[in-house]
Image (cartoon, coloured by chain):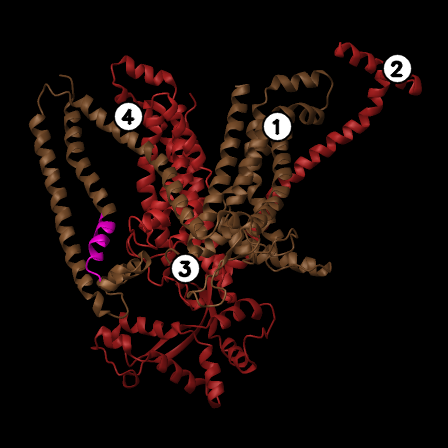
Chain colours: A red, B brown
Amino acid sequence: MTNSKATNSKTSTEATTMTTTNLTTREKVELSLARRRAAETRFRLYGMVSVFFGMLCLVVLFTDIASKGTSVFKQTSLTTEITLDSGYLGINKDSSIEDIRFANFEGLIKRHFAKSVKPKGRKAKRELFKLISPGAAWQLQELVLANPTAIDSTVTIELLMDDDVDQWFKHDFGNDVVDNGRLSEQQLAWLMTWIEEGQLDSHFNTLFFTNGDSREPELAGIHGAIKGTLLTLMVTLILSFPIGVAAAIYLEEFAPRNRITEIVEININNLAAVPSIIFGLLGMAIFINIFGVARSTPLLGGLVLTLMTLPTIIISARAAIKAVPPSIREAAYGLGASKNQVVFHHVLPLAMPGMLTGTILGMAQALGETAPLLMIGMVAFVVDVPGFINDPSTVLPVQIFLWSDSPERAFLERTSGAILVLLSFLVVMNTTAVILRRRLERRW
Amino acid sequence: MHSLPDHYGTLMALWTGVPALILLMSWHLLEGPVINHLLVAQLPAEIQAGDSAQIQLAISKVHNLATGSGLAADASLMPAVSHLAALNERTLLLNSGIALSLCLICFAATYRRIKPELRARTEMENIVNMLLLASSGIAVLTTLGILASVVIEAWMFFQKVSPLEFLFGTTWSPQVALRADQSGSSGSFGAVPLFAGTLLISSIAMIIAVPVGLMAAIYLSEYASENVRKYAKPALEVLAGIPTVVYGFFAALTVAPFIRVLGTDLGLEVSSESALAAGLVMGVMIIPFVSSLSDDVINAVPQSLRDGSYGLGATKNETIRQVVIPAALPGIVGAVMLAVSRAIGETMIVAMAAGLAANLTANPLDSVTTVTVQIVTLLVGDQEFDSPKTLAAFALGLVLFISTLVLNFVALKIVQKYREQYD
């Protein structure tokens, strides 16, 4: 009934339009074509704009960080000749390491510059000494430790400059901004003299890659963070790969199809989407408070990240096992293999490339993870490079987070530099995963 | 013969290694609590009589003194310190001794059983299967662990602060004074400003991510040539692979100042930690989640539906809007829900770019704070054990866990059901 009514009303409306406009259906369609074509073009354009917008964001993000971060690979230093006066330092070439460590290299540098630059008055002296990094004394000390016979000779050394000088030389001087407000006129005059004499120049910044964290921007490096990251990822990989693969094999090959298995599957899928910060809470409440695992260690970080990456690895490993065709299994059974032999001798090797790809992607996810590690104390200020998984340490993303909070302009540069290093690690891992997939993937 | 030589070998290895390994692992897990329990007896009487927080504090002092990192030696704790040193030495000996002898006993016992009649392969396979089962159990244990830790601590929090005040209170200032007689001794824990802030930032993110992600998915699956698709799709997915701390840095140091300058030029008052900056960047991060999931569901719509629509004379645009999208709608809704749960749980972008001030506002140019930011600020750094401030973080964690779990659960159900429909 309703149907016929609808048709009736439709025909009646059509009739009215017919009478008012006197057009055939064909003419109406032709008239609407232009509008429909325009809609089509518009719609297509929206799509293109969306894809373009995504790409643009990517490009802006990368260029922004690269433009802020590439200058970190240069460090300003002052090439100077300095006499290692044994009388002043109170050490000779037979002195013990302990004595050399306590020798007053800082005083020696101050005396050297006081003599060569001749500042007038205490204020000028203080301004002069502020140009040199506290790391310069440490450089001299390292030099003497490596070669005690250098004592009493005159050595040429590239002394580290303070971060204000470094920033001024790298950014403002090159762009003809002579005064950036951080340096006094007198300091700028000295710097200009040094530049004219060719003493002040920037060199490749090896310290950034060999030092741990520091309060002095020019001394802060990412070695400690990289080592911490590697140790943490090592723990994560050692735990999550075998457990993930074993779980995937069980669920895919051995688990009986029943309610419990279904719950386990739903559970794993949901776990993959739980916010990472929740895993930090778990790490705090269970690993630290109940099991007493030491805070801030790669071991603890690795445990938390294992739980976080397990679902990812299990899901991809299951997909890889599913992709192995049943004919392989049947052939193996036909030759008299047991269930375990079929799985471990035939299915597993064939599924391995897919599993490895999934694991690398899981590791890449763990590499960039920050939030759960904040909760378990990896935000501590750690100067020493961690030696093993039970030493306090930090990781690269957390180091980035810590530095991004520092007000110094030099730390901004170091943050971006550390991000560039982190991103290049990620690029390497993801490329490996793609290549692995291309190389080893089989089409059945 | 039933089993091959290597089956016997593997069986021996498993029997020798696995029990000792399990023993060592459980020993290490239980060692800490047991030692602490033994130490309590050695503490001075007045500390023993105190509450659990005092005992906890004394125990950690003892541990610090024993490792030599304690600052000042407290004479009353010294008996406990020396007891701890003795215990540590004894447990090390005991545990390696027991583990080693367990290895030897198991080895001897299995060695005696090695005979041609022994069905070594079956036994080995059973052990291996048990290990596989245990591995898949870890995922379930993780969920239980999350639930247990969050629920227990949240329960302790709700003993001190009423759940109603927490869920519906509108003032959030978790600073609790150290002594009861100080002014403002009880912090207020009304979490509504946090929920509102989370919703505000997530909505800004979704306003960016849903249209862009959906249109990108439609373009890539319906319009783009094979070549464009081959490069554009992975390029978009790179956005999802960038660590969130990088987005946070970008939001805090590039986008936020940019928006502030832009707003000032337009005569608007923009906070330096505006919700808009965090939301925009989060939206960009979420684009690939929406686009790749929607791409999957759009591709799952059978070609016959499209062909039918073309046959009726519809244009491509009309087919997509009136046939493909309605058919894919449940899946798209699922994808959006997953993206929302991702936005709610996102931590680093908001921790770096959004503020700490718990303002109850809907103005995107104002500074707001979110649930995740508060969890991080409450828990990073030194915490007092058992203080409502620390426990509040777990209560927030519980809310976060439940809300994302519900979103994920429903979304996954929808996506799954939808996939089966056309398979």
Mark closest to the chain's N terminus, 3 or 1: 1
Where the N terminus of chain B falls, by quadrant?
top left
- Front residue of B180/B260: it is B180
Q: Is disc 4 placed on a helix, strand or loop?
A: helix
Residue type marked 1? Leu
Chain for disc number 4? A
Instruction: Tell me which segment is drawn in magenta.
Output: B31-43
Mark closest to the chain's N terminus, 2 or 4: 2
- Same-chain check, marks 2 and 1: no
Q: Residue A287 magenta-drawn? A: no
- What is the C-alpha distance between the residues marked 4 and 1? 42 Å
Q: Is disc 2 placed on a helix, strand or loop?
A: helix
Q: In this figure, which residue is indicated by the disc labeled 3? A: B381
Residue type marked 4? Phe
- What is the C-alpha distance between the residues marked 3 and 4? 47 Å
Q: In this figure, which residue is indicated by the disc labeled 2? A: A15
Q: Is disc 1 placed on a helix, strand or loop?
A: helix
x then y, percent, for residue B120: 16, 23
Chain for disc number 2? A
Chain for disc number 3? B
Residue at image location 48% in from the left, 50% down from the top? B162
Q: In this figure, which residue is indicated by the disc labeled 1? A: B329
Instruction: Tell me if residue A284 comes above or below residue B134 in the rendering.
Output: below
Q: In this figure, which residue is indicated by the disc labeled 4? A: A344
